[in-house]
Structures are given as C-alpha cells and as structure tokens.
Image: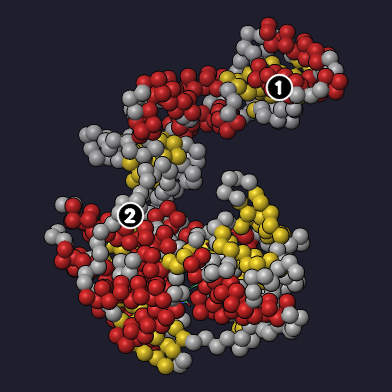
Amino acid sequence: MKPIRVVVIGGGFAAVQFAKTLRSKVRGSECEILLFNRENHMVFHPLLADVAGASINVDAAAAPLRQMLPGVGCRTERVQRIDLHSSEIEFDDGQGALTRLHYDHVVIACGAESNLGIIPGMSEHAFAFKVMSDAINLRQQVVRQMESAEATTDPDLRRWHLSFTIVGAGFSGVEVAGEINELVSSSTRFYRNFRKEDVVVSLVHSQDQILPEVAPKLREFARKKMEKAGITMLLNTRAVAATHEGVELNDGRMLKGATIVCTIGTAISPIVQSLDVPKERGRIRTTPDMRIEGQTNAWAIGDCAYIINAFDNKPAAPTGQFAEREGRQAALNLIRIVHGETTKPFHFKALGQLCSIGGYEAVAEMLGVHVSGFLAWLMWRGVYLFKLPSWSRRLKVALDWSWDVLFPRDLSFLNTDTTQQLTRAYYRPGDFIHRQGEPARVFSVIEEGQVEVLQQDPGTSDTKVVAVLGQGDFFGEGALLGKIAGSFTPLRELLVKAVTRGSDFWRRLPVSKSMLEGESIASFLDPLPPQLLTKETTFADAINALNESATGNLLVLDEKQRLWGTLDRGDLYQIIARITVTSAETRGDISRLKLGDLLIPNSIYVALEDSALVASATMLDHGISWLPVVKSKDDPRPVGLLRGEKISKRMLERIAQGQPTQARAAS
Ligand SMILES: Cc1cc2nc3c(=O)[nH]c(=O)nc-3n(C[C@H](O)[C@H](O)[C@H](O)COP(=O)(O)OP(=O)(O)OC[C@H]3O[C@@H](n4cnc5c(N)ncnc54)[C@H](O)[C@@H]3O)c2cc1C
C-alpha cells in the first residue's frame, strides 16, 4: 500500500516533537513525513539570550533538523500557500517557480513572527529577539559598542555607546537584559577607557512588575537582584518611539543609547494570515484533538494555534513547553485516525517556569515549588540541558557553560556585515538629520512626514526655515552621486541631470508657497491653440494638427464645446502603441479612427478661479508640464493653457538668494 504523506510546516518545538513522535511510532513504508522549515535547524529559543551574551557558542542553540530527525524528509523551502480544498501546499522551489505538492495530512506549526512595527522607529533602530540571527547580530552589536566606546574621546558619545535599552520585561526581555549586563560589566576590565560604572542597561516595562507570568515573590526577587547588578528598571513606562539616538518614553524622556532590543510585539505568520479558517486573535482555532475547525486532515499546533487545554479549559500558552506537548499529542491523534480510533483532546498540566536573570541567578517555579538564586540557576541550566535535542549538543552546551563559569566571555566578533545599500530611519519632530557644513553621507527619500531645510545666519546663530520637504522629496543627492558615480564622469553627469530634473522642492519653499497662493492663474495664461479638435476628429487629422502646432499641446472638445480631452505627442505615441498590438481586422483603417474612440477623457484641468499654487501642485502631482485652463468649475469651456516652466521661471526670479543647508524633521 502507498504510504500516506504527512507534510509538516515549521521546524520549531511543536513541529519537531510531532515529527519525532510520528516517526518513532509509524514505519516509513506506512507514512512519509516531509518537514518544511525555512532554516535547516531548530532554534532553541530559551538559549538565545545566552548566545547574545556570549556565554554559549551560536551552534549550541541551533540543532540541525536532518540530524535530529532521521527518517524525516527535511526541506528548507518556504511554504507559500496551503490549499485546504485540494490538499496541496505550494512552495517556492528556489528557482522562482512555485511547486505544488499533495498531502494526506498537513500540520501547521509555523509559530509566530516578531513585529517591531508596533512602535514607531523600532523596525529601523531596534533589534528583534526571536530568531538566531537576532541573537548573533545583537552579540556583535554589544561587542562593537564596547570597541567604539574604547575608541572615542567624547564622554557623551562613550556613554551613548555603553547604553543598552531593552523594551519589555517578560521572560526574553529579562533574560537578554541580564545577559547583556553580564557580558558588558564582566568585560570592562579588558578595556582602558571605561569602567563598569559607565555601563547603563535599562529595562523598560509598561506594568508595575517585571515577569508578570511568575509568582510575586519571585518577581520581586528578580527585580531586586537585577537592580543590584546595575540594571535600571523603568516600570509603568512605555517606549513610544525609537530613533538613532535612543528610545523615547511616554513621559517625554529620551533614553539615549546605541543599542535597543525590542522583545515585545508578535505578528501572525503570513501563511496563517492567508488561510481562510476560523481564528482567534490571528491564531488558528482547533477542535480539542488539534485539527483545524472544519477540517479533517489539517492540524495546527504551537504558537500559531489556538488550542483549548482540556486540563483547565483555558487556551494553551504560547510557550515551548506547550508547543512540545501539542506536537506529541497531535502525532498520537493522527495515528489514532489512521488506525480508525477515536482521537483524544489536548490535555497538559504545565510543569512550571524558569527564568535566568544574569549573574548565575535565576527564578524557578517547578511543580508548585518556588526557588530563586544560584540553586534556581543550576535547575534552569539542568532542565534546559536535558531538553536539548541530542547528547552531543548537551555535552557541547555543558562545556560552554562550564567554560563561562571558569573563564571570561569571548569578546571577539567576526564582521559579517555586507555594505548596507538601503535602510530606513525614523526621526522625531525636531531631530537633526544632517547639519549645516557636514559633508552629505546619506541620500534620503522622505517616506512619511515633513523635513524642514534650515539656514543659519552667519552673523547670529539664528536659523530660518528656507524649505519644507514632504513625502517623495529627497535630499543628500551629493552622497548618492559620490557613492554611485564616483569619478566616472559620464555616469555622474547623467545622475546630476536625473536628480535635478526630479527635484521639486521649490514647491514647498515657504516663500514660493505664499507667492503662488496669491497669484491668479490669469497672469500665467497662454492663449488657446489655434486649432481645437473634437471627439469626431480623425486620427489622421489629429496628427496633421499636431505637426502644425507650435507648442505640441492640443485640446479636444465635446459637442457642447466643453473640454473633453487633451492631446500631445506623448498621447499620440501611446495610441500608436495600443493600436499596433490590435489585429488589423479588429482595428480597421487607423487613419479614419476618431479621437473619441482613441483617447481617454481628461479630468485634469484647472479653472480661472484657482490659484497658481493649485495649478503647480496639480502638475507636479501628475508629473505633467502643462494644463488646460477652463472658465470655471461649472463652465468647463477652455480659455487657455498653463505651462509649468512659466511658473517656475517666475518663481526662480523671485526667490531670495541662499542655499538651503540643514534638514530637520518637521513632523
Ligand atoms: C527569546 C525567547 C525565549 C523563550 N524562552 C522560552 C522559555 O524559556 N520557555 C518556553 O517554554 N518558551 C520560551 N519561548 C517561547 C517558545 O520559544 C515558543 O513558544 C516556541 O518556540 C513555539 O514553538 P513553535 O513550534 O510553535 O514555533 P517556532 O519555534 O517559532 O518555530 C516555527 C518555525 O516555522 C518556520 N516557518 C514559519 N513559516 C514558515 C513557512 N511558510 N515555511 C517554512 N517554514 C516556516 C520558522 O522558520 C520556524 O523555524 C521563548 C521565545 C523566545 C523568542
């Protein structure tokens, strides 16, 4: 008999335990198991803080899936879609093509994603703490900051390099704060220019206690110990924004520091989002046996699933402990189904909580017993050591940990950064992006908000706003030219042309704005073209009219002499391109076709009552260089034409001398 195919999506606690249990109970000839996980290893999240704090080596917290799961087909393609109706998954084959694969059962165990987007600026300036690369990058960052602090002679800058802010004091926030503090404080003796007292590690938490999940006595213990170790607790405080400078708090304070770690905010994985199944706060709702509600061969387990625990009739917690049990019990249920037996509801009594707080201290709640301090730390290490997936890994981690107790932490880091091509930055109102006199290093495009360009009076230190840039505007072209073109003259000239052609910042110059607002359109008006076309004008006649026109801008009127459309050479080429892809039989004789059938009616025009500001903004927004002007909004009969170059020429004549030189975020 053909083996049934079980496809598992994910390679975390839930998926691995599921695949392991199923493989151990069912022979390969009966069941083929294919596990798709984006990475080729399972991440052991409870050890991520140790990786960031350099107390264990990176590979100790990442277990290779194919070595852990003999007999399971391990694949690293990202699953793009699950088609529950046809029982197929769709994944990218790595060459850009989508491959479909049929399954008999599918198990969704793709966890959750971190979401830094919940606080402005976090995505740009903070480290998430969820995947292995987050921990590795954070470790590099911490060591790099120590090196920078050693190198600088500016005490403020040194303090900034040595200030670390952790947002969120749940398990991962507390653990990572403890580890960073331990790494930096215990390493200061290897540096000459700073001491332990210069290091600032702050933990920002919106509630009045850290570790809300553990008993009050243990939380209090953890807080006191961490404060004693030098960590600053900012309780009942929320981070409202992150910038290059640091974290802005809800009380208006700015917590300056080069390193921000954001441990709050989770997002539903895209594949779960795309599934049209019952959900609870984004998580997939399951029946008690962990099949997706309304499905017979689709299962959901782990952090992406909303499972009611039959032990207490409460939703299962999104923790590794629960994910593992769900994986195991779902595998047993699937076997029951294959054997025609009745499935069992998910039932699990949580064993307890463990949290390391740094400095060989931890808090533990195991089977109702509360332990804190060094003993809890030993328990924490012991439990996680035995949770590790293989004996070789246990030995490796045990050696790392013993090494860490006896010897200083490793301060080397390999610079794996590639040249950063593109990044996003967040600025608060009033922040300086670029100061007068500094060479342009960054080319910036405004995605959201406004930027003021300030000029400093050489006599006094007063500044005045000389331009306001908005969405889509850019500055720092010098940096772009320098970086891209270098000394390659032809390319440089080309870029200069492109950059200056696209620049419309004059539109937002306050002086030009007020001037344009006060100018009527009439003062810029050009007369109507001598020949006015109609919807009935043939294509051949339109070409002749264009050839005879001095400006190349024509108007098309309707039966009541109202403006119906515009025509210039660009439109003509578009019509030709459109017509030539139509078969000769369908289009007939091109020259006889009428403009009414070829052109799209034009709704872009201004009325005599509009100001020159409205007219120039309309042209800039639509990327056009001329506009028809009608008598009034109620009477759209054309009265003339308006050209952008005429307005800009007048503007340039009037604008005061002086180059804008500073850029400041305005909103
Ligand atoms: C820093 C940190 C510390 C933690 N500490 C603890 C702790 O001490 N104790 C505890 O019980 N819990 C802890 N947790 C929580 C625990 O790690 C999670 O609850 C657990 O990992 C959930 O397991 P999972 O299998 O559902 O998902 P995950 O372990 O997140 O695994 C999901 C996997 O699916 C893969 N994936 C997602 N989408 C796709 C796709 N489309 N195609 C292919 N693969 C995909 C991902 O790459 C990932 O490998 C911690 C979490 C973090 C972040």
Mark 1 vs mark 2: which is more N-terminal? 2
The residue carrying pointer 1 sits among few (fewer than 14), some (14 to 19) or many (20 or more) residues within 10 Å by Cα, namely few
Q: What residue lies at 32% left-to-right and 57% top-to-bottom? A: 141
Position of 451 with respect to 258 (left or right) is right
Question: Please, what secondary structure does the residue beneath circle 2 have?
Answer: loop
Depth order, front residue of 351/220: 351
Numbered tag placed on residue 8 in the rendering: none
Report the residue at 67% width, 84% height from top: 345
Place of residue 619 in the rendered image (x, y in percent of width and height, measured from the top left): 58, 28
Q: Residue furthest left?
A: 192
Q: According to the image, label 2 marks what residue?
A: 245
x 54%, y 69%: residue: 70
Up-down: is 350 above or below 522?
A: below
Quadrant where the N terminus sits is: bottom right
Q: Report, in whole angstroms, how far the alpha carbon at label 1 lies from the one at label 2.
A: 52 Å
Determine whether label 1 and label 2 are within 8 Å by CB: no
Number of labels in the image equals 2
Q: Position of residue 211 (x, y in %)?
A: 42, 79
Residue 207 visible here? no
Task: Report the residue at 41% width, 82% height from top.
Answer: 383
Q: Could you tell me the amino acid type at mark 1?
A: Ala
What residue is disc 1 on?
577
Q: Looking at numbered disc 2 in the image, what kind of residue is underneath it?
A: Glu
Q: Nearer the viewer, mark 1 or mark 2?
A: 1
